[in-house]
Image: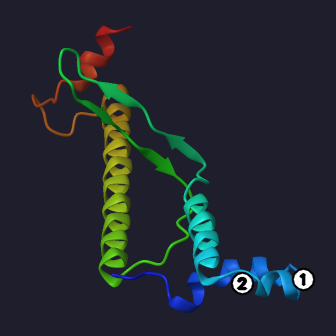
């Protein structure tokens, strides 16, 4: 599952070497270039807008656990399966948000109806208005 194309893998190293004198850039061995690539690529993932990494030690046990919560722009390429999952999660979030908005709107309409004294079904009530009135 190689997400980075070989040409893109050395792009930053090549940009770095292009900024040097040709004789200095040519003096780097393949091992040194690989070390430069590793150094550059390990620092890319550290730049997040929110980077929360607490460690939780379990009392009386030799184990500790860590949690990672990261928020930032995704700069890596996604596999087709990951794109499908991301799109599905986006649709699910919109669906849940929409249901919440519709539910709140219906609740407000019900409370407005009850406040105005409109009785659509005689002797039937959800009891929400009575609970709200009890607070005032």
Q: CA distance from mark 1 to mark 2?
A: 13 Å
Is label 1 in a helix, a strand or a loop? loop
**Residue at (38, 33) in percent of width and height:** 112
Marks counted in the figure total 2
Q: Is residue 131 left or right of residue 1?
A: left
Relative to residue 114, is residue 96 depicted above or below? below
Q: In which quarter of the view is residue 47 placed?
A: bottom right
Q: Which residue is mark 1?
A: 21
Q: In which quarter of the view is residue 89 placed?
A: bottom left
Q: Position of residue 77 (x, y in %)?
A: 48, 78
Q: Are marks 1 and 2 in contact (CB under 8 Å)?
A: no
Q: Position of residue 136 (x, y in %)?
A: 38, 8
- Disc 2 crowd rating (10 Å Cα; few below 14, some 14-19, many 20+) is some
Q: Which residue is mark 2?
A: 14
Is label 2 in a helix, a strand or a loop? helix
Depth order, front residue of 110/19 = 19
Quadrant housing the N terminus: bottom left
- Disc 1 crowd rating (10 Å Cα; few below 14, some 14-19, many 20+) is few
**Residue at (60, 59) in percent of width and height:** 43
| Residue farthest left in this picture | 123
Q: Is residue 126 left or right of residue 41?
A: left
Depth order, front residue of 129/101 = 101
Sequence-first tag of 1 and 2: 2
Depth order, front residue of 8/109 = 8
**Residue at (38, 61) in percent of width and height:** 94
């Amino acid at each position: 599952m190689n997400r980075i194309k070989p040409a893109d893998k050395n792009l930053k190293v090549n940009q770095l070497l292009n900024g040097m004198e040709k004789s200095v850039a040519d003096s780097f061995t393949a091992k040194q270039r690989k070390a430069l690539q590793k150094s550059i690529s390990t620092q890319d993932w550290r730049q997040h807008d929110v980077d929360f990494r607490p460690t939780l030690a379990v009392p009386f046990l030799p184990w500790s656990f860590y949690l990672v919560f990261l928020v930032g722009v995704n700069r890596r390429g996604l596999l087709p399966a990951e794109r499908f999952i991301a799109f599905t999660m986006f649709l699910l979030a919109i669906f849940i948000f929409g249901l919440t908005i519709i539910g709140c709107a219906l609740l407000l309409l019900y409370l407005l109806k009850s406040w105005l004294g409109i009785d659509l079904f005689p002797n039937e009530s959800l009891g929400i208005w009575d609970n709200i009135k009890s607070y005032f």
